[in-house]
């Protein structure tokens, strides 16, 4: 079946000229020829190199730091420690910016009184060469008082657990605690009465699940170059998911005004949420200030694993009750997520997403955010959702087997639809979950025969998708070509999508449109690239900016023809005079060529806070083959089905589904942080932290279900988060089908599965 | 009057565990102000740490969004993403 046939077109694509086509991506040539400039590629005159001193301990008090030997080393130009940065207060926030704690962010960038994980930065040095900087880092003497550490959420919740923060009291419980705890907060969501619901069930199943810390695994390490002038004007070139985020966060950590920092975004070699915060930039700025020279800092892979935010591991307890006909009567979920060294795991989002695909009457969900001596967690595609879905979708699989029901039929019986009240509260508008189940049921994959030791699993997932602040400028060049400038780094092909949406409004061929990711002084503020918001929200801004440019061009045409502007229409990229055939239509190039005579340069702009993001749902089918001699699992066939709203550039939408599925497969069967007894990370490299490579997985088939989002002019839904949610359970359910063994702990690595196979003999 | 639903965490902190309230307001700003008058301190918490879903649509940075007399308003954790 071809792609065209696979797309369930709830949308009349015929009304679009450019949307839904597959032009070559604007950044493609630079990337495949190696010309694209990533974070580490910039070289400036007199540039020197920074290196970070990191804690070798999981938990320790810093008694003293002696930098004398490092400072005396020839070639060393600057050294900084935590004492060189402002001490922020716990209430420090920036209005309008993400509600993270700058107090914690600052202490994560560079430790003050304590180190809280292996890899926590304690000092930084800049020298004329990379080698001298590394040598100087080794000369910095840190005197530590070792403290007991705790690595797992359930251990950290015990009353006698070592405390990471003596000022942390659990929020969300009554009476308010009087003693500190590693549990930063408790969240809860309730619908109906679960006790009554479970009492009404014919069948009740429950399981506990454990998952490990996993990293986003982006190929490009964190890297930046910073300069600062004598009058305090800083410039930062770096790889991130948001140049405005880097500016705001660095300004606050360094005690500067945002206007004194310019951030130029480089190309980004993967982020997946891991580059929605900062690590090196404040260190580079302060080293550059002291050295009076530009400073480049590039993390090693070891530093990326040890010191940048992975996503939370955790524990889950899921219980579901149902009638014999498959109607779910009650469901409960308890989640404990490891936030890392500072609070802020995505446990609330796990709570909100786990049961969201289902129309349930009685639900109880409780989550705990727990600090442990691991690096501070950062966002990773659909933060919090994959672990919750692993628990829920695995438990549903057990329920389907117990009821003797087809697992798709069980999901169809309980599927959320328009008007369903989500377990986290609000009622859904138009959504396409049922359509993904129908597509799964009708897909040839679902009915294909399986061989010996092979099994098939299915699982679903939900993500909210978000809007937010976005800006766009559409500039009409003098020859009629067009620049589309936005403030969002392109991590998933968004430049192509921006160009396509602008082309659709302007009626200009996509080849004449050049999308640009602009620096912080060239476009107004935009929220960072994340949460699957850019094609939706920044796309909305581009559409409005293009419409603004069209308004301007119609006015210019009216001036040229000396008619009222309401006598001008915009058709197929041209201004057309209506009610007369006296005037020949004017193209964009015609109007642009007359710009100086009709009022000056032509452009359109839009600055919006976009609302109306449409939720996304996906359903994945996975086939595995299990080697019962070794415990190795091979994914032999995989199909990812998702309601994508409208696929602006279908190839990149398919790529998002494929990439998310592969990352989820890695999470399911390979990836985990492995710590020794002292809390030191043992597998901080890609040889030992095994992400799937192309030869590990089959071609991921995709089905784009298109149920347009009514909150976007072209029906866009975010697509990047959903595809990482179903794979964990889809793989586990396939393994259960192949072996009869319910694996509840991830990763389902060969040793773990082999032990289960042997135990079952 | 709009139906307002609070998360348990917020309710435990400010309303003695009551999660459903009825509030008269024309927009989110007025709604938060009304809640803050009734439960001092809640306004700051709502303004800085929560998103709002009005009749099913989530707003990450709500302020002037209109609220109808029969609207359902849920205060939720802000949604981040990868």
Image (tube, coloured by chain):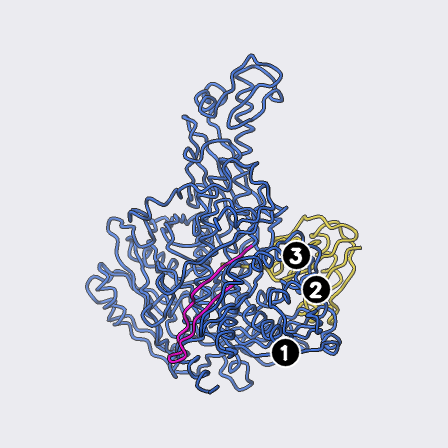
Q: CA distance from mark 1 to mark 3?
A: 34 Å
Q: Quadrant of residue A398?
A: bottom right
Q: Tell me, what hue is chain B?
A: yellow
Question: Magenta segment, which residues?
Answer: A621-642
Q: List the single residue furthest toward the top.
A: A582
Task: Examine the structure image and report whether residue A635 is included in the region drawn in magenta.
Answer: yes
Q: According to the image, label 2 marks what residue?
A: B6
Query: Which residue does the image show at 59% across and 45% down from the upper left?
Result: A715
* Chain that appears blue: A
Q: Pick the residue in front: A419 or A533.
A: A419
Q: Compared to A368, does A560 lie above or below?
A: above
Q: Residues within 10 Å of mark 1 (few under 14, many from 20)?
A: some
Q: According to the image, label 3 marks what residue?
A: B52
Left or right of A360, for residue A524 = left
Q: According to the image, label 1 marks what residue?
A: A205
Disc nearest the viewer among 2 and 1? 1
């Amino acid at each position: 079946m071809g792609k065209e046939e696979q797309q369930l077109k709830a949308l009349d694509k015929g009304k679009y000229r450019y949307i839904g086509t597959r032009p070559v991506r604007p950044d493609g040539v630079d990337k495949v020829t190696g010309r694209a400039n990533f974070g580490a590629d910039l070289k400036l005159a007199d540039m020197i190199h920074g290196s970070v001193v990191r804690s070798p301990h999981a938990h320790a008090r810093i008694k003293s730091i002696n930098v004398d030997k490092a400072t005396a080393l020839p070639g060393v130009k600057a050294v900084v420690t935590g004492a060189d940065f402002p001490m922020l207060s716990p209430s420090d926030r920036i209005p309008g910016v993400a509600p993270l704690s700058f107090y914690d962010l600052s202490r994560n960038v560079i430790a003050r009184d304590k180190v809280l994980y292996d890899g926590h930065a304690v000092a930084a040095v800049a020298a004329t060469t990379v080698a001298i900087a590394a040598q100087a880092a080794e000369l910095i003497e840190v005197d530590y008082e070792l403290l007991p550490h705790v690595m797992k959420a359930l251990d950290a919740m015990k009353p006698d657990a070592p405390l990471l923060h003596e000022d942390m009291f659990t929020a969300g419980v009554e009476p308010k605690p009087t003693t500190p705890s590693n549990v930063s907060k408790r969240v809860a969501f309730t619908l109906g009465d679960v006790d009554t619901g479970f009492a009404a069930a014919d069948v009740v199943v429950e399981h506990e699940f454990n998952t490990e810390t996993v990293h986003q695994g982006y190929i490009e390490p964190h890297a930046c170059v910073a300069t600062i002038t004598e009058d305090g004007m800083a410039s930062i070139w770096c790889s991130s998911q948001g140049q405005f985020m880097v500016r705001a966060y660095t300004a606050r950590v360094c005690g500067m005004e945002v206007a004194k920092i310019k951030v130029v975004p480089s190309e980004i070699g993967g982020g997946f949420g891991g580059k929605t915060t900062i690590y090196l930039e404040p260190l580079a700025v302060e080293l550059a200030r002291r050295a009076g020279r530009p400073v480049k800092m590039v993390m090693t892979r070891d530093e990326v694993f040890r010191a940048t935010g992975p996503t939370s591991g955790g524990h889950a307890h899921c219980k579901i009750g149902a009638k014999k006909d498959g109607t779910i009567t009650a469901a409960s979920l308890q989640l404990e997520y490891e936030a890392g060294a500072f609070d802020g795991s995505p446990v609330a989002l796990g709570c909100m997403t786990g049961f969201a695909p289902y129309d349930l009457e009685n639900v109880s969900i409780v989550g705990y955010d727990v600090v442990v001596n691991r690096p501070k967690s950062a966002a990773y595609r659909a933060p919090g959702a994959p672990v919750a879905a692993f628990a829920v979708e695995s438990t549903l699989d057990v329920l389907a087997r117990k009821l003797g029901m087809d697992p798709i039929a069980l999901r169809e019986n309980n599927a959320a639809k328009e008007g369903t009240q989500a377990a986290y509260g609000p009622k859904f508008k138009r959504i396409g979950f049922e359509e993904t189940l129908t597509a799964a049921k009708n897909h040839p994959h679902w009915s294909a025969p399986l061989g010996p030791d092979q099994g098939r699993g299915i699982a679903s997932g939900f993500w909210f998708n978000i809007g937010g602040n976005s800006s766009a400028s559409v500039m009409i060049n003098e020859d009629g070509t067009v620049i589309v400038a936005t403030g969002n780094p392109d991590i998933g092909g968004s430049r192509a999508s921006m160009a396509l949406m602008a082309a659709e409004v302007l009626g200009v061929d996509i080849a004449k449109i050049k999308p640009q990711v602009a620096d912080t002084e060239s476009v107004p503020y935009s929220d960072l690239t994340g949460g699957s918001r850019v094609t939706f929200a920044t796309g909305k801004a581009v559409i409005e900016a293009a419409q603004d440019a069209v308004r301007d061009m119609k006015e210019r045409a009216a001036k040229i023809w000396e008619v009222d502007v309401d006598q001008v229409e915009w058709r197929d990229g041209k201004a057309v005079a209506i009610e007369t055939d006296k005037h020949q239509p004017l193209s964009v190039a015609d109007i642009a060529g007359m710009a100086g005579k009709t009022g000056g340069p032509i452009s359109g702009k839009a600055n919006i806070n976009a609302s109306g993001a449409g939720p996304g749902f996906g359903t994945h089918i996975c086939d595995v083959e299990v080697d019962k001699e070794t415990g190795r699992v091979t994914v032999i066939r995989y199909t990812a089905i998702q309601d994508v709203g409208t696929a602006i550039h279908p190839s990149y939408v398919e790529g998002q589904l494929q990439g998310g599925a592969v990352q989820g497969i890695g999470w399911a069967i390979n990836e985990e942080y492995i710590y020794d007894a002292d809390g030191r990370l043992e597998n901080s490299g890609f040889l030992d932290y095994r992400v799937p490579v192309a030869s590990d997985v089959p071609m991921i088939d995709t089905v784009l279900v298109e149920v347009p989002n009514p909150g976007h002019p072209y029906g866009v839904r975010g697509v990047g988060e959903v595809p990482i949610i179903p794979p964990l359970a889809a793989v586990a359910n396939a393994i259960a089908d192949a072996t009869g063994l319910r694996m509840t702990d991830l990763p389902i690595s060969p040793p773990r599965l082999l032990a289960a196979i042997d135990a079952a003999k | 009057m709009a139906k307002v639903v609070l998360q348990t965490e917020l309710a435990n902190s400010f309303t003695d565990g009551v999660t459903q309230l009825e509030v008269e307001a024309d927009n989110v700003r007025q709604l938060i102000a009304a809640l803050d008058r009734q439960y001092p301190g809640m306004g700051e918490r709502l303004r800085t740490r929560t998103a709002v879903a009005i009749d099913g649509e989530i707003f990450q940075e709500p302020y002037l969004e209109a609220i109808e007399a029969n609207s359902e308003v849920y205060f939720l954790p802000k949604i981040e993403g990868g």
